[in-house]
Amino acid sequence: MPTARRPHAAHTATFDLHGKKPALNVLIVDDSKAAADLLKELLTLQDHTARCTYTAQQALDAAATERFDAALIDLTLPDFPGTEVARRLRAGTTEGTPRLLVAISGFSAQDAAGASAQGLFDHHLQKPIDIEQLDRILAQHSD
Amino acid sequence: MPIDVPSKLLIVDDLPENLLALEALIRAADRIVYRAGSADAALALLLEHEFALAIVDVQMPGMNGFELAELMRGTERTRHIPIIFVSAAGRESNYAFRGYESGAVDFLHKPLDPHAVVSKVNVFVDLYQHRKALRHEMESLAAAHRKQEELVQQLQQTQHELEHAVRMRDDFMSMVSHELRTPLNTLYLETQLRQLHLSKGNLANFAADRLPAMIERDQRQIRNMVRLIDDMLDVTRMRRGALSIQPQPVDLAALARAVVENLRQQAEAAGSVITLDAPAGLHGVWDEFRIEQVLTNLLTNALRYGGGKPVEMVVQPIGDMARVSVRDQGIGIAPEDHERIFEQFERTEGSRQHAAGLGLGLYITRKIVDLHAGRIGVESAPGQGSTFVVDLPLHTGTAGTDPKA
């Protein structure tokens, strides 16, 4: 995946105290509250910051007021699809588009339902989410 | 193609000795000769048999040969029978016979020349046999064609059904794996989080006061997965007609209380509460495990689609039936969906947006109610909530397997 640096990256990414990778501010949207909260806890333990939302609207509202480096977006959301969240984030109608959009779903990227996300997302993670895989994706985008 | 059916020949003459002489001339193994002593007798035979040829004496008392021939030409059934007139030469030449255009007509003159008679009759009989063989062949061709068309149609139908079944199975597998991945994801994230805590030495997260909640969270996800797998297997059994019930004495009121108690936490999580109105006891003969499944499915649906508002369950005896009704105040169901929701994999758009699921709960519920010779129905309108009503005979008898499956 390309790692083109965007100008605003320097403002949001802060150096963590261990001097390794800069931490990211991550937006999470998943209607499974338990899964979203666990993801946040996992990211926080790895020195990132994260905010949980449980509907597409909540995610867009959050992005309108806060700048995120990355967004983890469940494709199946109760109010409207995750692809629509990505589309609106890409369209730049929110406060600074996260430079990394990751789709999360129970489908594989090859499924019809997963394929609809092609081109909108930088990565696709199929549930159950492997944290090391997520770490690698975040690391690629945090330098 | 040879036809074994003999050709029928009609000879008409008022003189019996003429009939006998003619019959002797034209008789053959594959022919049956019918004699008529008058035009009237001939007409009677014509109604009864299909003739290859009629040999008609022109001079007869009463109706003469030409008049008989005209009657024959006027009737669809006999119009095309070839006619050989037997005439005394010269005497009837001024008679204008009408009907030449409808079929073959020939003349034999008295005194009869045996060779001429035999060869003329042979020609007509051969013609008849050929036509008959041809018609038979055409008919069997048409029949074969029809049969083939039917087969092709059957094959196409079967192909459609198979394709549909394969598509259903693929969709089903895809749905099941998708649905399983949700609880699996939560469980997997939990284990990864614990691993991370362990590797960082954060043992406080495993303190005794935290463990019960941790176990409860895991168990909820595991129960979700078990329920999905059970539903999947139940549906497979139902399709084979292999789902059976084991009726035994059950207290429905006590069962309802237990189910409501089991779902208390789930109701809390949905921001809802379940109220139960049931008598002290309501005894009947049912499959306890399956009825528990029915009550659980109805209440789980009510919590899912109930918009966090209270859910009411009422259990009551009505005549020789037990009635269970479950009412929610949620999104409701449009009238056009009232039947569909009981079919497998059918979900309304509203339900899809509100909660994950396979669309099997109500299908299984109705099958179980059917097996108990009961009824299930729904009253609902969009935005008005839904009330599901199940009526179960107090004694199901020994109903075995699903008769409809």
Image (cartoon, rainbow, N blue to C red):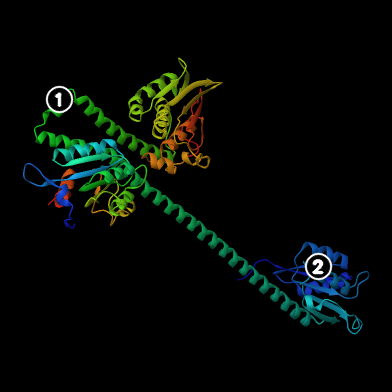
**Residue A97 place in picture, x, y as percent:** 25, 51
Chain identifier of the residue bearing label 2 in the image: B
Task: Give the Cα separation between the discs numbered 1 and 2.
Answer: 107 Å
Foreground of the two, A128 or A119: A119
Task: Name the quarter where the N terminus of chain B is drawn.
Answer: bottom right
Q: Are marks 1 and 2 on the same chain?
A: yes
Residue B129 in view: yes
Query: Above or below — where is B386 with respect to A120?
Result: above
Q: Earlier in the sequence, mark 1 or mark 2?
A: 2
Q: Residue at x 90, y 85 (%)?
A: B90
Label at residue B75? 2
In the rendering, at what x and y percent does residue A142 appear? Answer: 14, 50
Residue B176 at least partly seen: no
Residue density around tag 1, few if under 14, some if 14–19, many if 20 or more, within 10 Å: few
Query: What is the three-letter code of the residue carrying label 2?
Result: Thr
Residue B328 sits in which quadrant? top left
Please give the chain letter of the residue carrying mark 1. Answer: B
Q: Nearer the viewer, mark 1 or mark 2?
A: 1
Query: Which residue extends farthest top?
Result: B280
Q: Is residue B344 above or below residue B297?
A: below
Report the residue at 26% width, 35% height from top. A34
The residue tagged 1 is B207
- Say if A31 sits above or below B166 in the image: above
Q: Position of residue B239 (x, y in %)?
A: 43, 41
